[in-house]
Image: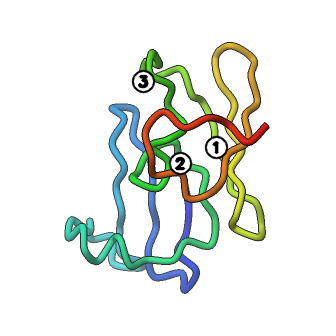
Amino acid sequence: MDFSADSSYLQVSTGSYKRQVYEVPSGKQLVDQAVIDRITWATWTSVLGDEVIGIWSRHAEKADVNCACVSHSGINLVTGDDFGMVKLFDFPCPEKFVRTCF
């Protein structure tokens, strides 16, 4: 769960592997992708979204990547997976099947 930098939006990742964005405090779901793309997030812990497509390896299944966190500077992303691996990426990581930084 992550808040936008201005605390106007909240993003969550569901158990069915969908990223959902809500307005705060109304709780209304935001579905306009153009608006979502312009949001600046204060934190990023989601394994879903265009910004993190590159964390998924070519042979990964949905549940393989368990957690993600963007650094305070907003330039690095670290993930943890089912295989006990901790991987470091540049953030955002929008290209499919990128190599880790580390």
Specify few, some or many for label 3: CA neighbours under 10 Å numbering under 14, 14-19, or 20 or more. Answer: few
State how many labels appear.
3
Quadrant of residue 68 within the rendered picture: top right
Picture coordinates of residue 39 (x, y %)? 43, 77
Amino acid at dot 1:
Ala
The location of residue 12, given as percent across then percent down, is 45, 53
Mark 3 vs mark 2, CA separation in Å = 13 Å
- Taking depth in this image into account, of 64 and 99 the one nearest to the observer is 99
- Residue at left offset 54%, top offset 86%: 6
Closer to the camera, 40 or 27? 40
User: The residue under label 2 is which amino acid type?
Assistant: Ser
Q: Please tell me which of labels 1 and 3 falls first in the chain.
A: 3
Tell me: 12 left or right of 80. Answer: left
**Relative to 33, is 61 on the left or the right?**
right
Q: Vertically, is 15 above or below 81?
A: below
Where is mark 1, residue-wise? 68
Element under disc 3: loop
Placement of 69 over or under 31, stated as above or below:
above
Do the numbered discs 1 and 2 sit on residues whose CB atoms are within 8 Å?
Answer: yes
Which badge, 3 or 2, comes first in the chain's sequence?
2
Q: Which residue is mark 3?
A: 62
Q: What mark, if any, has residue 46 been given in the picture? A: 2
Which quarter of the rendered picture does the C terminus lie within? top right
Query: Please, what secondary structure does the residue beneath circle 2 have?
Result: loop
Give the image location of residue 2, x and y in percent: 56, 62
At horizontal 61% and vertical 57% (from top left) the residue drawn is 91
Is residue 54 shown left or right of residue 26? right
- 3D distance between C-alphas at marks 1 and 2: 6 Å
Give the quadrant of the N terminus.
bottom right
Q: Could you tell me which residue is drawn at 44 percent across and 22 percent down? A: 58
